[in-house]
Image: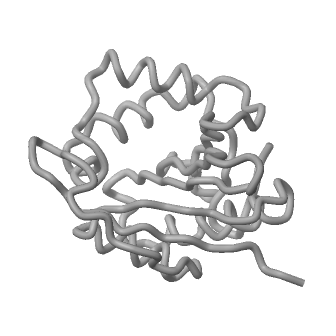
Amino acid sequence: MKISSNTINLRLLDKSDWELFKVLNTCPKIMEHVFEPFSIEETKKRFEERTQPWDGEVGQWLCLAIDEINTGEKLGSIGLKITNDKARIAEVGYLLRIEAHGKGVASEALKLLKNYAFTTLNLNKLVATCSTKNIGSYKVLEKAGFSREGCLKQNSIINNKYKDDYVYGLCAPQE
């Protein structure tokens, strides 16, 4: 499976992506608004889960690597997991290497994933949660057409501090 634009490819995460996955999940700066950085052991476990074949089961992540077309550079990952099979709702998430921040990579990847989710997977709605302090992330969501549906106070704990999260949603276009 490969989904492409003029600048990036999305492809299934595979064993060659270990170094990228390790950086994304253990770097304090990248994880600042997401989770506490994972240990190497937890990162290995998550990597094994994310590189398993995706069968669309509720709660299982479809994890895609984001590669720059011209250089082949591994820029980050993006994915979705179905959270409600009956209502056809999936959560989306993305992480980028610091060097790829602010260059439109997340926006382009989310646009590709959104189109795939609605046209190929026939999903009804995509949702995302992000820290109220993660301005870059919620601007990506808003640029992709997601609407802020609420604010969850003290919804997560990162580095022993409660964090507020925004909840976003995007429904499939109706014909």
Q: The N terminus is located in which quarter?
A: top right
Placement of 19 over or under 132, stated as above or below: above
Residue placed at 41% from the left, 78% from the top? 139
Viewer-nearest residue: 112 or 6? 112
Q: Is residue 81 left or right of residue 29?
A: right
Placement of 162 over or under 153, stated as above or below: above
Q: Position of residue 13 (x, y in %)?
A: 61, 35
Picture quadrant of residue 57:
top right
Q: Is residue 73 left or right of residue 114?
A: left
Placement of 49 over or under 25, stated as above or below: above
Residue placed at 15% from the left, 52% from the top? 162
Q: Residue furthest right?
A: 175
Viewer-nearest residue: 98 or 118? 118
Viewer-nearest residue: 13 or 130? 130
Q: Position of residue 49 (x, y in %)?
A: 56, 23
Q: Position of residue 155 (x, y in %)?
A: 27, 54
Residue placed at 45% from the left, 78% from the top? 148
